[in-house]
Image (spheres, grey):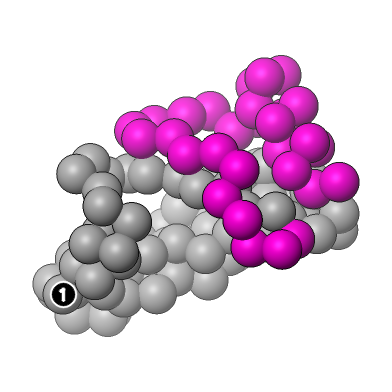
């Protein structure tokens, strides 16, 4: 995700990570720092986001267009730098 973010953030891509970990904030910060992730992360230990989007699996990714409409949902891991994902990102960023 970080590679896709660095490649497309100038084109309007925003990534917001949501952690459902119940541990201290420092654990999430340390995780983000260790992986060199530069996009923001929110904490949701009460799992309200999971409930709101009716998720049963993590990780999950949503692509929203500029109007905030969900255009794509991915449950589980995805390589956001492969050709298919790059094309999908470009379509949503139009």
Residue at 52% x, 64% y: name it: 16
For the record, the magenta segment spans: 66-94
Along the viewing direction, whichever of 45 and 37 lies nearer the viewer:
45
Along the viewing direction, whichever of 68 and 1 lies nearer the viewer:
68
Along the viewing direction, whichever of 12 and 39 lies nearer the viewer:
12
Residue 77, picture quadrant: top left
In magenta segment, residue 13: no
Residue that lies at the very extreme toward the top in this rendered image: 83
Q: Position of residue 61 (x, y in %)?
A: 46, 45
Q: Is residue 30 above or below residue 74?
A: below
Looking at the image, how many numbered discs can be counted on the residues? Answer: 1
Q: Quadrant of the N terminus?
A: top right
Residue at 80% x, 59% y: name it: 12
Q: Position of residue 31 (x, y in %)?
A: 35, 61
What residue sits right under mark 1 in the picture? Answer: 46
In magenta segment, residue 81: yes
Q: Is residue 84 above or below residue 78?
A: above
Residue 81, picture quadrant: top right
Q: Residues within 10 Å of mark 1 (few under 14, many from 20)?
A: few
Whether residue 73 appears in this view of the structure is yes
Q: Position of residue 22 (x, y in %)?
A: 13, 72
Residue at 59% x, 33% y: name it: 80
Residue at 45% x, 62% y: name it: 17
Whether residue 20 appears in this view of the structure is no
Q: Position of residue 11 (x, y in %)?
A: 86, 54
In-image side of 78 versus 26 (left or right): right
Residue that lies at the very extreme toward the bottom in this rendered image: 25
In-image side of 47 versus 67 (left or right): left
Q: Is residue 43 above or below residue 60?
A: below
SS at mark 1 in the image? loop
In-image side of 87 versus 50 (left or right): right
């Amino acid at each position: 995700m970080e590679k896709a973010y660095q490649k497309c953030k100038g084109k309007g891509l925003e990534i917001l990570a949501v952690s459902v970990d119940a541990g201290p904030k420092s654990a999430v910060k340390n995780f983000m720092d260790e992986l060199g992730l530069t996009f923001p992360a929110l904490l949701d230990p009460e799992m309200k986001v999971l409930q709101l989007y009716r998720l049963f699996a993590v990780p999950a990714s949503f692509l929203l267009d500029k109007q905030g409409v969900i255009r794509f949902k991915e449950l589980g891991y995805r390589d956001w730098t492969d050709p298919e994902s790059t094309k999908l990102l470009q379509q949503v960023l139009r």
